[in-house]
């Protein structure tokens, strides 16, 4: 065995350990939400949900979007991309749950974290990074903030 192959083997082990740690942290954060979701939808959709979160976090890039078919390929491998896409589609189309479940969970987690910091005597700050979500077709979309774009400005003049 050469030194290079030993280095590659060691690096592969490090990557596997980091990935294992990442998924443990993800599961620890998402477990209460997954339990709530398990009460509402089929268990297979819950496992798809958790795996989909991992795929999004692992493959998201600022300049590249992820299409549903690409996510399906990342979820189950490129050979089974259509099956992965169908699983994601079934999850998103399920009428037994909505985005509000995720919003409530994240708000609850944020409140718990803020309370823990306050109890520890630390100052809690909310940082607003001026990011905007643009949906200029509607003047007031629920859950979206103000938009800085020329199209939104034109629509606002109406």
Image (tube, rainbow, N blue to C red):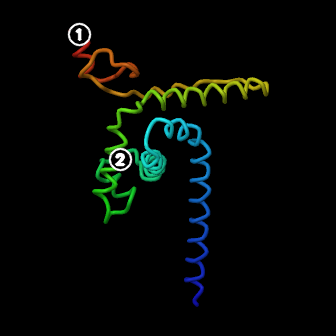
Is 100 displayed left or right of 28 in the figure? left
Place of residue 118 in the rendered image (x, y in percent of width and height, measured from the top left): 74, 23
Q: Does residue 2 lie above or below 90 as drawn? A: below
Give the quadrant of the N terminus: bottom right
Instruction: Give the number of the disc on residue 157.
Output: 1
Look at the numbered discs 2 and 1 and tell me whether their residues touch, using CB distance below 8 Å.
no
Vertical order, 59 against 153 (above or below) = below
Crowd class of label 1 (few under 14; some 14 to 19; many from 20; radius 10 Å): few
Relative to 16, residue 102 above or below: above
**Residue 114 percent across, percent down from the top left:** 67, 26
Residue drawn at (38%, 59%), measured in percent from left and top?
76
Q: Residues within 10 Å of mark 2 (few under 14, many from 20)?
A: many
**Residue 67 image label:** none
Q: Position of residue 107 (x, y in %)?
A: 55, 26
Residue of label 2 = 88
| Residue name at image x 54 percent, y 30 percent | 105
- Separation (CA) of disc 2 from disc 1: 39 Å
- Between 149 and 88, the one lying in front of the other is 88
Which residue shows up at 31% across the image and 51% down it?
85
């Amino acid at each position: 065995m050469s030194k290079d192959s030993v280095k590659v083997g060691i690096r592969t082990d490090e990557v596997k350990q980091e990935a294992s740690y990442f998924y443990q942290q993800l599961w620890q954060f998402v477990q209460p939400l997954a339990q709530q979701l398990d009460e509402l939808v089929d268990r297979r959709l819950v496992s798809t949900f958790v795996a989909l979160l991992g795929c999004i976090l692992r493959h998201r890039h600022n300049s590249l979007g992820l299409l549903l078919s690409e996510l399906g390929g990342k979820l189950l491998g490129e050979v089974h991309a259509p099956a992965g896409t169908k699983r994601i589609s079934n999850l998103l189309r399920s009428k037994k749950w909505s985005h509000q479940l995720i919003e409530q969970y994240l708000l609850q987690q944020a409140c718990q974290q803020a309370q823990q910091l306050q109890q520890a005597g630390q100052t809690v700050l909310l940082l607003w990074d001026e990011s905007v979500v643009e949906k200029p077709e509607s003047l007031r979309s629920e859950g979206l903030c103000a938009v800085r774009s020329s199209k939104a400005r034109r629509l606002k003049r109406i």
